[in-house]
Image (spheres, helix red, strand yellow):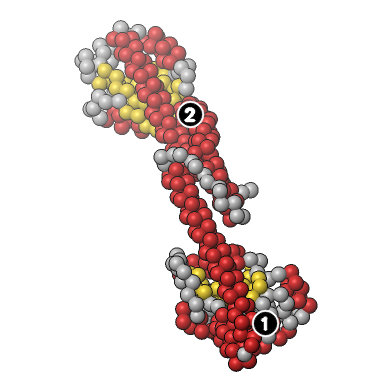
Amino acid sequence: MKWTLSWKILVSISGLLLACSVVVAALTYVQTQRSVIEEHQGIVDIMNYTFETLLSQDALPSLQRVVENSATVGGVREVVIVARDGDVIASSDRLAIGKPSDSPLVQRALSLTSSQRATHMLDDALILLQPLRGSRFMGGAAGDIVGVVQVTVARENIDQQARAAALQLLTISFGSYAVIALVLVAILRALVTKPVHALAALAARLLKGDRSQRSRIQRRDEIGVLSAAFDAMADEVDGLLSGLEGQVAARTRDLEEERVQLERALKELEVSTEARVALAETVRALSTPVSKLYEGVLLMPIVGDIDAERAEQIQRSLLSGIEAHDAEQILLDLTGVATVDAEVAAGLLRAARAARLLGASVTLVGITARVAKSIVGLDIDLTGITTRADLQSGLVHALRSLSGKNGAVRKVSRPVPS
């Protein structure tokens, strides 16, 4: 499964909300326990008021019935009334009446003079102790503490109510959080994921040569900033490549004009052997021009047939240009080369290897089908030499290589001969 940004955010939010739900459920469990205890404490207060009223009227039979009935209230397991002397005067367990109370909690409560009620949470029960104020029957003055009421509540009943409340809250929270998470993911997909995927698709089409692609996302957020940056980059690349195409076309026209002029000069100098030799030297020098397209990028267009002497001249011009301009990328344009034999190929390979010794990479561009067939037929090893179909793709490769090493490259306004 591919983890997209939306799924990562969904998992993160779900985990956070789950943790919050567990914490809230735990707090709810504790709070519910307290509420149940307070509820039972309120019940004990009512019982105690009833007991004091009955005792003030000396109605012991009625008191015993009320005690037994109180033990049937939900969760109440036992109700005991203990006099100041420690004897049980009323109990939900009739067998305990008239006997001394064996509860250490009751004995401790009887030994205190405080009138505050006490609560003790045991492993299996909740013990609620309430002071019993004086009555004529028990020999005390009104307001004196003359006994203790002990109410025992089953711990299981309290825990069950607390668990039910916590589970209910947890269920509601999970449902709510799930809806919230899905809504957030849908919003994120619409606002972030889809625009990012759209920009990635536009970038892919731009790399394939469709320079008209633009995002045109008008938003005042980070996605809008990213879209504006993408469009600005696309405009810059389009302008740069358009300028390069114009330069290459202009340079090609200049080279063609130079070639025509050279041919005309050759015809004019045919009458003189000395002039023909001098002209031949000029032709060889001009037939291997080295042009600086960018800082660190040289172009050497090769036109016409190549013999051993011209191959040597190509190597000299190439090495001189590399040393003079500190070039790192060399483009050998073979568009004007009709055929390549073993000697010519060996000369070009020697030139490329010599360039590598000076730290420059050579890229062969403009290889025609006929030249490619000759190279394959001669089983020429081009290992270490990059080839591209045309000058434009070769130039893009050179610029990318330079950008990867040195950052942005500087454009040269005009070619500089070697």
Three-letter amino acid code at the position of disc 1:
Ile
Can residue 240 be seen here? Answer: yes
In percent of width and height, residue 312 lies at 61, 87
Residue 8 image point, x, y percent: 53, 46
Horizontally, residue 19 falls left or right of residue 109, namely right
Q: Is residue 260 above or below residue 3?
A: below
The residue that appears at 63% across and 70% down in the rendered structure is 365
**Is residue 284 in sight in this rendering?**
no
**Spatial distance from mark 1 to mark 2, Cα to Cα?**
88 Å
Q: Classify residue 140 by image quadrant.
A: top left
**Percent coordinates x, y for residue 397 in the rendering:** 57, 66
Q: Position of residue 362 (x, y in %)?
A: 59, 76
* x 64%, y 75%: residue: 303
Relative side of 370 to 187, left or right: right
Question: Number of numbered discs present?
Answer: 2
Disc assigned to residue 169: 2
Mark drawn on residue 361: none
Along the viewing direction, whichever of 10 and 90 lies nearer the viewer: 10
* Above or below, comparing residue 234 to residue 120 in the picture: below
Q: Which secondary structure, mark 2?
A: helix
The numbered mark at residue 306 is 1
